[in-house]
Image (tube, grey):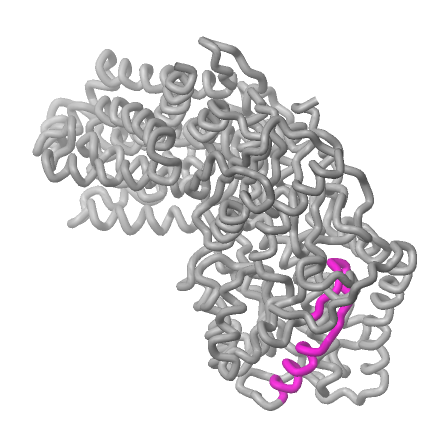
Amino acid sequence: MEAIFQIIVSGLTLGAMYALGSVGLALTYGTMRMFNMAHGVFMAIGAYGAFFAADVLGLPILLALLGGIVLGGVVGALLHLLVVRFMLDTKDFEINILVATAGVGILLQDLLLKLFGAYPFRQPVQIEGTVELGGVVIPVQSLAILFVGFTLISAIAWGLTRTSFGLSIRATAMNRDAARLMGVNATATYLQVLIIAGMLAGAAGVMISSISTLSPDMGTNPAIRAFVICVVAGLGSVGGAGITALALGLIEAAVQYYIGARFGLPLMLALVVIVLVRRPAGLFGREEVVRS
Amino acid sequence: MTDTNKTTTMPTRRNFLRTAALGGAGSAAMLASLNSAARAQSSEPIVIGAPLPITGAVAADGIEFQRGLEMATAEINELGGILGRPLELVVEDTASGGDDLISSAGQRLVDRSNASVLISGYNLGSNTALPEIAADASLIYMHADTVVRHNELIREDPARYWGSFQYDPAEIYYGIGYLDYIKNLVESGQFTPSNNKIAVITGPIAYSINIANAIRENAAEYGFEVSLYESVQAPISEWGPTLAKLREDPPGFIAVTHFFPQDQAQFMLQFMNNPTPSLIYMQYGASLAAFRDIAGDASEGVLYATVIGALQDEIGLGFSEKYLAAFGDNASVNSGGQTYSALHAYAIAAALAGGAGAAYEEEQNRLIADRLRTLIFRSPMGTMRMDPETQSAFCYPSQTNDPSLGMPHIFSQIQNKNENGYIIAPTPYDVAAFKTPSWMG
């Protein structure tokens, strides 16, 4: 029983981190048909931002966490202002932006390397201590990751479905030209989407680094998982990405316990293949869910 | 492997350390003497090519490898370089990657930087990429990959790989050495385990797997039982499912042979949330400052071993002091000392051979290789003496019971998170006694 509870805790912790990483990616693709290959580096930037705020500036961890999130948003805004907006109306945008963001990712990662080096720093933005629940000792940081993940994703879901801002995002995602005719500023909407995606990536980076370490390439593996989750959920499905992330986190933890720790990712990828064979548009995707 | 120089009497600690200190000073004096007797062959710098993992998963080591080479380069240049020619260090990043990245880094050093020698700590991959490049370019290549694959490669084709040297022993001595150490710990009454079970946790890299397999295959012979054999992916941060297995059947011993320091640190942080009465051994990674930085209090009590770690004697401490003064308190002498020692050994061998050779200068580089094969070099990490059959350093005490003739397989325990672990075995290098970890007390 204790083992099952431990698997659930580990699975939800993994799932919450995956969800934070993948929801921003899904939002960007769903709205703009843009696969942001620099998403993993956005995570690293958020993590280093929080580290800098806490370790160098000496800010309290809550402010440092906010600093990391805001920095992720700023980088998202800069990506839009300096790169994306010039490419939006180009032919083959989906392919071109893939290559462009991959280049931006390499550039930013090298920048982090120059600024901080490759030494694996410990993330100071974390809560020490444990609590005991049902005979299982749970690190408080795992609960913090769950809380942050749940809070941010709920806020995004609420914003998308209950606000005029969310309405403009959904409208632009469905049909950009029609949205423009209805008075929606599509360019501003895209900017806002990249800011939100950057903030989510920044939060994911802080959370991931709190149970691993900081390194300029720390976002690579989480970004691969985020891409996998987005594909399984159905490209562009924000809610689906969140649910799929939690499910895959739980499955991975269970596989690690019952079959073996090394089989977690390989079986997750095998599951992806099976899902895509059975449902090419993903579990929550439709054949055409984004703007035409 | 055979050891023709194996002796039967153990030296006294005091006499041995005194002789060793003289030997270390003698090495620098020898190079200075050779330099002063020689006329400068040319003013062209000798390029030391360093293909190192300075980014990626094992960057904590790679950064130190670079620092060790920088320090050795500066020291050798102060002594007059190699027969009057100064050294110039050129580093290429292998990014903790596989053979593709390692090969291209090595090739760039040969083709673009005109390296006269390739020196690394360790790289990942199959461990054959750089020996191939060195063989094609007729260059000397010195590394501390710590793999038996190197020995096999040399045995399979010594005519091709004459220039590749592993300046520490292969990993095959770790598994047996660990079993032998914990058996002695129990039999000598220093430690009473809760049971004779060992949980072995390994990673995806051949080095870790070979060590884990050696423990599994030989445990029964030493009176132990392997109750769990778990392979993990790398990097790994969430250890929950693995810890759940350990907590279901708590073993007396846990051996983590997956060696990434950040992953080991996360294991300890999560283990300490609800520890089992298990003595924890961590392969190599815990010897780095990054492990103590990340794990903090949870690092105290952990045992680790390395076949190439800085000793805590006169030579080793002298080096450590200089190294930490140059690079700061969170620098790792255990990894920096590796490349530092290798470059010093190369410099002496090249000076004795009449100078450094360039790429494709096979005749000169073969002379240097001959010197390296017969050199007995006392470094801060112990004595570097090559087994001519495998071109790997001899291991003390597994291959020789004379500590002046082999690189020691040292066991250390972290007893203070702010300091490097104290060496607790083998004699005569031990400086502290084993302490039962706090989570077991």
Q: Residue at x 71, y 59 (%)?
A: B396
- x%, y% of residue B373? 66, 77
Q: Which residues are magenta?
A: B364-385
Q: Residue at x 16, y 35 (%)?
A: A275
Could you tell me which quadrant the N terminus of chain A lies in?
top left
Instruction: Report the front residue among B289 and A194.
Output: B289
Query: Which of the 4 image quadrants contains residue A202?
Result: top left
Taking B74 as reference, is A23 left or right?
left
Whether residue A112 is visible, yes or no, is no
- x%, y% of residue B13? 87, 54
Taking A257 as reference, is B327 left or right?
right
Instruction: Report the front residue among A156 and A291.
Output: A156
Image: B210 above or below B6: above
Q: Residue at x 48, y 64 (%)?
A: B127
Residue B375: say if magenta: yes
Image: B214 above or below A266: below
